[in-house]
Amino acid sequence: MTPYVRAPSCDRAQSAGLEPPTRKHLAYCIGQHVFEPSRSAVRQPGKNETILRPKTAQVLLHLAMHGGQVVERGDLIEAVWSGIFITENGLSQCVAEIRRALGADEMLLRTLPRRGYLLDIPPPSMTPVPAAPAYSGGIPVLAMLPLRLVPPDPGLAVFADILLDGIVGALAMLRQPVVISANSTRHVASLQEDVPSLARRLGAHYIVTGSVCRLSGHVRLWVELAEAAQGVVLWHRAYVLTEAGLLEALDELATAIAHTALPHLRDAEIRATRRRQHDIGAYHLMLEAQCVMTRLDRGSFDTAGEMLWRAAALDPGFAAPHTALAVWHSLRIGQGWSADPAADGRALEAAVQQALELDAGHARALALLGHSRTILHRDYATAQDLLDRALEIAPNDAETCLWVSPTLAYTGRTADAVRSAERAIRLSPEDPLLFRYQHFLSIAHYAQGDWEEAAQWGLRSIRSNRGYTSNLIMTAAALAALGRAEEARPIVAHFLELVPSYRVSVRVPRQAFRDGVQREQYGRHLLAAGLPE
C-alpha cells in the first residue's frame, strides 16, 4: 500500500484522558437526569434516553467533573480536542446537544459571556447511581480497542495510538453507530478477556480490534470487526505499509478503515432486524429501507419510501431517518419516477430541514441540502455555504464528500469536484451506493472535459447498477462526445425503457451546469447519443 499524504498532529498520540478511567464509569445526577459517561447516555429514569455523540459526551463529562465551577471555553476545547484545531462553533454545537438532551434541566448548564460554561450541580451530586443495562436497544454501540503491538514495539506505539484516535474520530463523525470514546477504551490493558464479556463491560454491541507488527522493512496492520454477543467476526483486513512516511499515512488510513468496516456492521444490523421483526426499531427499519432502496427497482423503491416514513414516525426525535428520506426523494426525482418533481423537491428539503432541526450539526443533511440547492434551484451561493459547513463538521465522511462533488463540477471547480468524488470512493470502497459515487465522479470528469474518464466511470457505474437512470444519460453523453455514439445506443435504449417520457428539449434547460454554453453542449451530446429531442 502506498502511504497516504496527510498527517494529523502528533500531539494526538498523547494520552488525552480527562481523568482516571474509574471516573468515567460513574453516573452523574443532573437535575432529574442521569448522565452515564461509559455509554454516552443521558436518561431520565423511567423515560427515554439520549445517546450523545462522543465529543459531546466528553464535553458533558468534563463539565460534570467540575460541577459548580466555571470552565473556560479554551480549557474545555483543550481538554476534549487536545491537539486538534476546531472552531468555537464545534463546541457550541456540543453544548446545544447537551441542552436538548437535558430538556427541562437545560438551565443547569449556564453560559457565562466571555468566560465559559458552568454546570450548576454541587460536587456531592456526582455520586454513582445504578447504570442502565448495556444492551438497551436502539442505535448500536461500537468500541475500538487499542491496537496490540506484536511483539511489544515502543517505536510503533505512537502510530498505534494515533490510529486508534483516527478510526474512532472517523466513525464518530457519522452519527451512527454510537462510538465509545477512545479515552474510555485506551485503558483496556489486554485482550485476555473474551469479546462478549469485554463488550458487556464496555456497553458495546460491536468490537473492533487489531494488531501492528514489523515485517522485513514494512509494517503490517491487521483490523477485525466482531459482533459482541457471540464474538463472531464480521470483517477483517490486513494492510501492509512502508515504514517511510508511516505517520503521514494515518489520517486517510484511519478513515478508510472506518468506512470499509461500516457496511459490514450495517449488514449485521439488517440481519439482526430480520431475526427480530417483532421488536424492530426506527434505526433498524431505516437500515432495511436503505438496503431495499439501493436495488433501484420501482416497486421495491416505493416500499423503501414507506419504510422510511414509518421509521421517521417511530422515533420523531431521530434525525437519520429524515435524512435517508431526503435521499429517497432525491433518487426518485433523478430516476424520473416522480409524478410531481416540484412536490418531491419540496418534500426533500422539508425532510432535510427536519433532520437539521433535530441535529443542527448533521453533516450529511447539510451536504444533501446543498446538493439539492444546486440541482433543483441553481442556488449556487447557498449551496456552497451549506457544503462548506458540512465539510467543516465531517471532512472524513464519505457521503458528505460525495454530495459536495456535483456542485463543484457544475460551478466550474472541476478539479476539486474530481478530488472530492475520488476521496468519497476511497473512504467507502464497498458502499452499497457505490454506483452513485462512480456516477458523481463521471459528472466531475465530464464537466472537466475529460470525456474518456467520464465514460469509463459511467460504464463502471452501469456495471454496478444498470437501473440508475441519471448515470445512463451522462455516460451516453460522454460516449457521444468521444465520437462513440454507436456504443451509446444500447445504453440510450435501456434508458428510454425506464424513462420513456424523456425529452432533451425539456430536461436540459433545467440541468445544473451554471455555464449556459456547457449546458447546451451537454444537450448536443445527448442528441448525438440518440436521445429524443
Image (cartoon, helix red, strand yellow):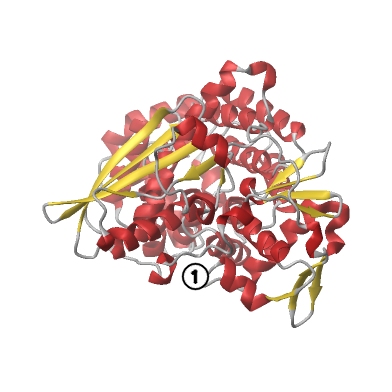
Q: Looking at the picture, how far across and down is residue 493, in whole percent?
A: 39, 27
Instruction: Name the residue rendered at 84%, 36% in the picture.
Output: 46
Q: How many marks?
A: 1
Foreground residue among 227 and 95: 227
Which secondary structure, mark 1?
A: loop
Is residue 316 left or right of 473 when viewed as pictured? right
Q: In this picture, is 532 found above or below 183?
A: above
Residue 392, picture quadrant = bottom right
Instruction: Name the residue rendered at 77%, 49% in the picture.
Output: 34
Q: Is residue 500 visible?
A: no
Residue furthest to the bottom: 114
Residue furthest to the left: 216
Q: Is residue 190 visible?
A: yes
Foreground residue among 490 and 104: 104
Q: Which residue is mark 1?
A: 84
Q: Looking at the picture, how far across and down is residue 403, in whole percent?
A: 51, 52
Q: In this picture, is 320 found above or below 268?
A: below
Crowding near the residue tagged with mark 1, few <14, some 14–19, many ≥20 C-alpha atoms within 10 Å: few
Instruction: Name the residue rendered at 64%, 17% in the picture.
Output: 277
Residue 529, picture quadrant = top left
Foreground residue among 425 and 274: 274
Q: Looking at the picture, how far across and down is residue 477, in whole percent?
A: 37, 44
Q: Which amino acid type is shown beneath numbered disc 1? A: Ile
Is residue 367 left or right of 455 when viewed as pictured? right
Q: In this picture, is 104 found above or below 437?
A: below
Q: Looking at the picture, how far across and down is residue 363, in whole percent?
A: 59, 55
Foreground residue among 479 and 152: 152
